[in-house]
Image (spheres, rainbow, N blue to C red):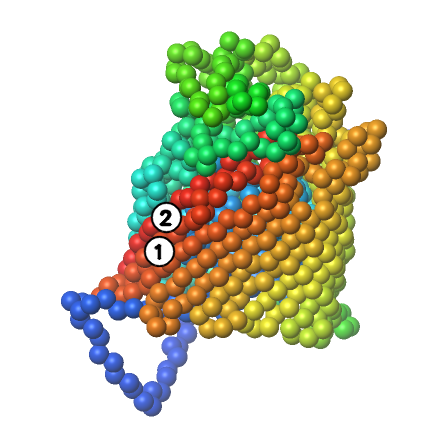
């Protein structure tokens, strides 16, 4: 294994050196050219309305060629070493949500957007934790990509103010992107930053939400006279209440993106800085195993405005990140590219754990303080070559990647004296400054992770374009180090440990176009998951497991009928399972998880002014081959059998500029434990919205209003380890956007 590791490191160094030498960091000077001349036979003169006249209504902005009818879904997606490809040419199930959808839904986080895909389930804990499930596998914010690179996007902040497109690639994807830092298997989320458009733009948005939350956003876009250099800047601030009782959020953020295109080179640079503070955050409710039967196997009924976040708790983060990406056309058939990104995250968190111990609501509250610094650096280099053989076009790619991550952390685990008891139905909170006293703030090196890989792929397309074959693989090396780090309060201490593993992950995929409207596809692909940590309640708390290998089989069909498109897919994913032994109380790999499902999604504008998005997923996620058969056949916790979403937008033709919208989400019943004793009831949530576009003089203005969970539905989301999370009650958001 050490020999393989040395060979891999040497190969990456050679690839990095070779590619860097072929990529000039300066662009070619612009070539002069004559302007186009147009002969106007007929001129129609239309008088302009004076500024002092009443406002004019306007229609929705014109669509661009790269989006589907309705403008909500982009046609193209970025697929790692396979590059940017059209929806119909991709042998995977991919959805790319466009910025228009982000703006019109007033989405404040990535989860608000990706849940428009029926394969995605929301696992977010209030404003402090962006988490979701794709095809039954949990993922978090730290597993997102920025412009195709892991380890650069904000680790804890999921805001969308700088995002132009959110791409959801469903399924495992070791070849395409390498292993995710936190090991998500169900899919990949990629953020495409905003870029400067052809026309100058200055957009100002002012928003107001329930619980007196005010927000301001400035979006500035400029491009040079020759069109080669663009700059896009976004500045955002919000302050006030959040979706849950007494929860408050304050955010300052700034983002800048540059792009430069010369004759043979293209370069982009992105930088962002974020300060985000959440106070009194709503947290999960954990239910003691002994009372689950007394509750009838169901989560307790509580008021939608119930409070589980202790006063005085907080989460403060400061994040800075940047990324440089460039590509250079060596000739018409050979392109080199390189990307380098970095991120530094500071976090301070004082949270509470809420454990229900009696049927009458008596509960225990435990507090933890954690402060940490996360540092990551990530890079990729590669070469793409086009080769034309008899009857088949080849697109060959070789790429090398490296991501190094360090976490400096110290966790105060307050002793039993810091615990106190209350009743969840009428909680009595303690003054934390007096109850907890002082706690330690320091940041020793806790752990590090290094991911090295080399990928090789060949995309073969027949000359008639009807058949596409993808063959490739990625050799991935994983090195994880855990350092001695005493924890206060409980006397436990970790010892130094290190493990190094290397895996090769192949992929085979094909696309067959029956005609311009129908594509059939199939794939076999493997994924890698970083080994899970044993939970804090396990006897081996904090122990790191070895990496898991996931195997996926998938077939599907895509239909493009111009005004509407749809995808139907069937998949099966197997991977080792992480289970808590009820006898030994050890968290360890035992048996496997088998996720099988059917996905159907549609989007488009079947009739002018009527836009649709939605679909349904059937998922059978079960445990197999567990120790002693203890959990065989049980449904994986947090995975609903059925998920359905439906979004409808309707322009009111009698009132130009006016649009009404509605959005529905349905989750079937879900278990919150491996033994399948705690069950969460099915739930359905409706959202309603409206927007009105008009011209105030020469200034386009858009007024938006949305009400979420309009019927104030009381529902729980199932998590894991006997834990549930209360869904947010009725909330609303108002905003006004002016484009200067």
| Number of other residues with Cα within 10 Å of mark 2, as a class: few under 14, some 14 to 19, many 20 or more | some
- At 42% across and 19% down in the image, what residue appears? 428
State whether residue 97 is above or below residue 651. above
Q: Nearer the viewer, residue 392 or 85?
A: 85
Between the C-alphas of marks 1 and 2, the distance is 8 Å
Report whether 163 appears left or right of 85: left
Helix, strand or loop under label 1: strand
In the rendered view of the protein, which quadrant contains the N terminus? top right
Q: Nearer the viewer, residue 307 or 326?
A: 307
- At 39% across and 16% down in the image, what residue appears? 431
Location of residue 572 in the rendering, given as x and y in whole percent from the top left corner:
75, 50
State whether residue 40 is above or below residue 603. below
Question: Disc 1 or 2, which lies upstream in sequence?
Answer: 1
Report whether 468 appears left or right of 207: right
Image quadrant in which you'd find residue 502: top right
Report whether 166 appears left or right of 44: right
State whether residue 70 is above or below residue 295. below
Q: Is residue 292 visible?
A: yes
How many marks overall? 2
- At 38% across and 47% down in the image, what residue appears? 732
- At 38% across and 72% down in the image, what residue appears? 653
Location of residue 483 in the rendering, given as x and y in whole percent from the top left corner:
62, 20
Residue denoted by label 1: 704
| Number of other residues with Cα within 10 Å of mark 1, as a class: few under 14, some 14 to 19, many 20 or more | many
Location of residue 152 in the rendering, given as x and y in whole percent from the top left corner:
53, 41
Q: Is the residue under label 2 in contact with that under label 1 (CB below 8 Å)?
A: yes
> For residue 733, which numbered disc appears in the image?
2
In the rendered view of the protein, which quadrant contains the C terminus? bottom left
Location of residue 78 in the rendering, given as x and y in whole percent from the top left corner:
58, 56
Residue sticking out furthest to the bottom: 41
């Amino acid at each position: 294994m050490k020999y393989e590791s040395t060979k891999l490191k040497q190969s990456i160094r050679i690839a990095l050196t070779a590619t860097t030498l072929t990529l000039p960091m300066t662009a070619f000077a612009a070539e002069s050219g004559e302007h186009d001349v147009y002969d106007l036979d007929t001129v129609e003169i239309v008088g302009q309305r004076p500024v002092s006249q009443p406002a004019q209504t306007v229609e929705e902005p014109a669509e661009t060629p790269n989006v589907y009818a309705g403008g909500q879904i982009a046609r193209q997606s970025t697929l790692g070493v396979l590059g940017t490809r059209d929806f119909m040419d991709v042998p995977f199930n991919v959805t790319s949500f466009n910025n228009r959808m982000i703006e019109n839904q007033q989405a404040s986080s990535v989860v608000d957007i990706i849940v428009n895909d029926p394969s995605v389930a929301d696992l977010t804990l209030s404003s402090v934790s962006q988490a979701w499930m794709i095809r039954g596998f949990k993922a978090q914010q730290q597993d997102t990509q920025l412009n195709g690179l892991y380890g650069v996007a904000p680790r804890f902040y999921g805001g969308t103010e700088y995002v132009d497109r959110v791409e959801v690639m469903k399924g495992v994807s070791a070849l395409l992107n390498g292993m995710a830092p936190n090991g998500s298997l169900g899919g990949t989320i990629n953020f495409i930053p905003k870029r400067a458009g052809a026309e100058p733009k200055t957009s100002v948005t002012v928003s107001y939400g329930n619980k007196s939350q005010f927000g301001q956003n400035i979006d500035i876009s400029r491009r040079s006279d020759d069109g080669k250099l663009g700059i896009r800047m976004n500045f955002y601030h919000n302050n006030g209440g959040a979706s849950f009782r007494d929860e408050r959020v304050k955010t300052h953020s700034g983002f800048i993106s540059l792009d430069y295109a010369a004759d043979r080179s293209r370069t982009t640079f992105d930088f962002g800085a974020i300060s985000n503070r959440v106070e009194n955050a709503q947290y999960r409710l954990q239910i003691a195993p002994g009372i689950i039967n007394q509750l009838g196997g169901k989560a307790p009924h509580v008021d939608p405005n119930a409070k589980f976040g202790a006063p005085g708790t907080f989460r403060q983060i400061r994040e800075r990140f940047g990324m440089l990406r460039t590509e250079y056309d060596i000739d018409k058939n050979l392109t080199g590219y390189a990307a380098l990104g970095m991120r530094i995250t500071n976090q301070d968190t004082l949270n509470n754990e809420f454990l229900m111990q009696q049927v009458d609501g008596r509960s225990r509250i435990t507090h933890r303080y954690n402060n940490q610094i996360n540092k990551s650096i990530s890079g990729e280099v590669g070469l793409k070559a086009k080769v034309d053989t008899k009857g088949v076009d080849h697109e060959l790619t070789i790429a090398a990647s490296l991501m190094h991550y360090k976490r400096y952390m110290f966790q105060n685990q307050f002793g039993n004296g810091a615990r106190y008891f209350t009743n969840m139905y009428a909680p009595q909170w303690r003054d934390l400054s007096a109850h907890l006293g002082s706690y330690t703030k320091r940041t020793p090196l806790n752990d590090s992770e290094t991911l090295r890989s080399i990928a090789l792929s060949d995309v073969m397309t027949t000359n008639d374009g009807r058949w596409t074959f993808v063959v490739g693989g990625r050799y991935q090396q994983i090195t994880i180090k855990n350092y001695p780090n005493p924890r206060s309060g409980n006397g436990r201490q970790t010892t130094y440990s290190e493990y190094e593993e290397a895996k090769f992950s192949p992929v085979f995929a094909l696309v067959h176009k029956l005609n311009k409207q129908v594509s059939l596809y199939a794939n076999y692909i493997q994924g890698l998951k970083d080994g899970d940590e044993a939970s804090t309640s396990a006897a081996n708390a904090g122990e790191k497991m070895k990496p898991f290998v996931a195997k996926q089989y998938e077939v599907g069909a895509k239909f493009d009928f111009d005004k509407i498109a749809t995808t139907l897919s069937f998949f099966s994913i197997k991977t080792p399972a992480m289970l808590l032994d009820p006898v030994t109380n050890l968290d360890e790999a035992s048996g496997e998880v088998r996720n099988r499902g059917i996905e159907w999604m549609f989007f488009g504008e079947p009739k002018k002014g009527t836009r649709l998005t939605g679909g349904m997923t059937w998922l059978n996620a079960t445990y197999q081959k567990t120790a002693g058969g203890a959990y065989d056949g049980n449904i994986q916790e947090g995975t609903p059998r059925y998920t359905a979403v439906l979004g409808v937008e309707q322009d009111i033709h009698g009132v130009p500029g006016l649009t009404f919208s509605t959005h529905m989400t349905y989750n079937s019943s879900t278990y919150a434990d491996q033994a399948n004793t705690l069950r969460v009831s099915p739930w359905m949530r409706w959202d309603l919205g409206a927007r009105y576009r008009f011209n105030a003089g020469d200034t386009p203005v858009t007024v938006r209003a949305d009400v979420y969970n309009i019927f104030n539905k009381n529902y729980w989301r199932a998590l894991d380890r006997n834990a549930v999370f209360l869904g947010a009650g009725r909330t609303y958001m108002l905003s006004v956007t002016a484009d200067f």
